[in-house]
């Protein structure tokens, strides 16, 4: 267990931040699932900018890696293009 006051504070801060990051990452995953399950092309095209914006913000704050965000956006774009 931590003995120093600064170490105790760091534990409190990191736990709070972990929950914050977990919430936003989970929200993004749900948005991605929703887009992937969409079969209507116009609806998917409307969702795509919101999802990409969400991914970019997560990458900017280092919640996910920037390459992972780029890979996800690329796969989603390909999915939308394949919809009839």
Image (tube, rainbow, N blue to C red):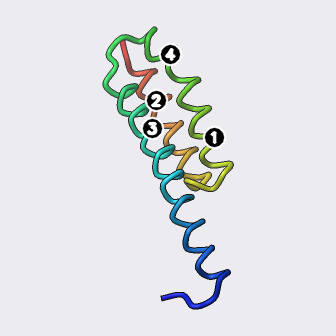
- Find numbered disc 1 in the image and state the secondary structure of the residue it sits on: helix
Question: Which is more N-terminal, label 4 or label 2?
Answer: 4
Which mark is nearer the camera, 1 or 2? Answer: 1
In the rendered image, the vertical position of residue 10 relative to residue 57, given as above or below: below
| Residue found at x 56% / y 45% | 69
Tell me if 83 is positioned left or right of 52 in this view. left
Q: Nearer the viewer, residue 63 or 19?
A: 19
Q: Earlier in the sequence, mark 1 or mark 4?
A: 4
Q: Are marks 1 and 3 in contact (CB under 8 Å)?
A: no
Q: x and y percent of residue 38 in the render?
A: 34, 19
Q: Nearer the viewer, mark 2 or mark 3?
A: 3
Q: Residues within 10 Å of mark 3 (few under 14, many from 20)?
A: some
Query: Of marks 1 and 2, which one's residue comes earlier in the chain?
Result: 1
- Lower position in the chain sequence, tag 1 or tag 3: 3
Compared to residue 79, the image places residue 40 above or below, namely above
Q: CA distance from mark 2 to mark 4?
A: 11 Å
Residue labelled with disc 1: 56
Of residue 40 and residue 10, the one placed in the foreground of this image is 10
Residue position for label 2? 78
Q: Which mark is residue 27?
A: 3
At horizontal 58% and vertical 56% (from top left) the residue drawn is 65
């Amino acid at each position: 267990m931590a003995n120093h006051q600064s170490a105790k504070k760091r534990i409190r801060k990191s736990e709070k931040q972990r929950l914050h990051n977990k919430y936003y990452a989970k929200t993004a995953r749900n948005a991605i699932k929703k887009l992937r399950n969409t079969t209507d092309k116009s609806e998917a095209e409307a969702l795509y900018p919101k999802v990409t914006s969400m991914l970019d913000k997560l990458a900017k704050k280092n919640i996910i890696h920037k390459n992972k965000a780029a890979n996800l956006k690329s796969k989603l774009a390909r999915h939308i293009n394949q919809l009839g």
